[in-house]
Amino acid sequence: MTLRHSLYLTFPGNAAEVLTYYRSVFGGELTMMLYSEMGNLDEYPFNPDPDWVAHGELRGIVNVSGGDGEVKALGSQVYSMVLYGDDVEEGRALLERLAEDGGEKIMDYEQAPWGDWYGQVRDRFGVTWAVAATDR
C-alpha cells in the first residue's frame, strides 16, 4: 500500500477563499467541488449552502483537503501544522508569507535549542503553522 497524507480542515463557509489562499502560499494544484454538484443535499446531516465547497484538495509541497461545514471558526490552540524543510531561508520566507495579510507571528523564526530553525505563525484564517528547517 502506498500512502499519502493530507490534513483535512472543515471551514465555516469560506473554504474556497482559504484553499485559494493556500495555493498562493504553497503552490500546487487545487480542485474544488461544490455541494450543488453533489446531488441530493437532503442526505447530509446538516443543511449545506449549495455554493459551499463540499470537497477541495490542494496537492503540492503541502497537501490540504477540506470542505465547508457547520463550524464557527477554524482556529484552535490544540493543534498546529508542522512543515519541515532543508532550506533555512525558504523556511523563513514561507513563515513570512503565512504571516502576511492579517496573519500573526507567534514565535520568531530562530535557531532552536535542538539545532533546527523554527518559528510559528497563525494565518489570517486562524490556522497555526510551525515551520522548521535544518541547515545541517
Image: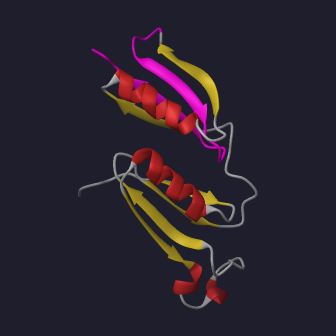
The image shows residue 68 at horizontal and vertical percentages of 62, 67
Q: Position of residue 61 (x, y in %)?
A: 34, 46
Quadrant housing residue 47: bottom right
- Residue placed at 57% from the left, 71% from the top? 53
Q: Is residue 25 visible?
A: yes
Please name the residue shown 46% across and 45% down the image: 25
Residue furthest to the top: 113
Q: Is residue 58 left or right of residue 77?
A: left
What x and y, as percent, mark residue 77? 68, 36
Q: Is residue 115 magenta?
A: yes
Q: Residue at the left extreme?
A: 1
Q: Is residue 80 above or below residue 36?
A: above
Whole-percent x and y of residue 50?
64, 82
Left or right: 32, with 50 as reference point: left
The answer to whether residue 61 is left or right of residue 38 is left
Give the residues drawn in magenta, as a range. 113-136
**Who is closer to the viewer here, 93 or 41?**
93
Quadrant into which the N terminus falls = bottom left
Residue 43 lies in quadrant = bottom right
19 is higher (above) or lower (below) than 88: below
Render colour scheme: secondary structure
Residue at position x 63%, y 60% in the image? 11
**Image check: 121 left or right of 86?**
right
Direction front: furthest residue? 101
**Splitting the image into 4 quarters, where does residue 88 fall?**
top left
Query: How many labels were placed on the picture?
Result: 0
- In the rendered image, which quarter contains the C terminus? top left
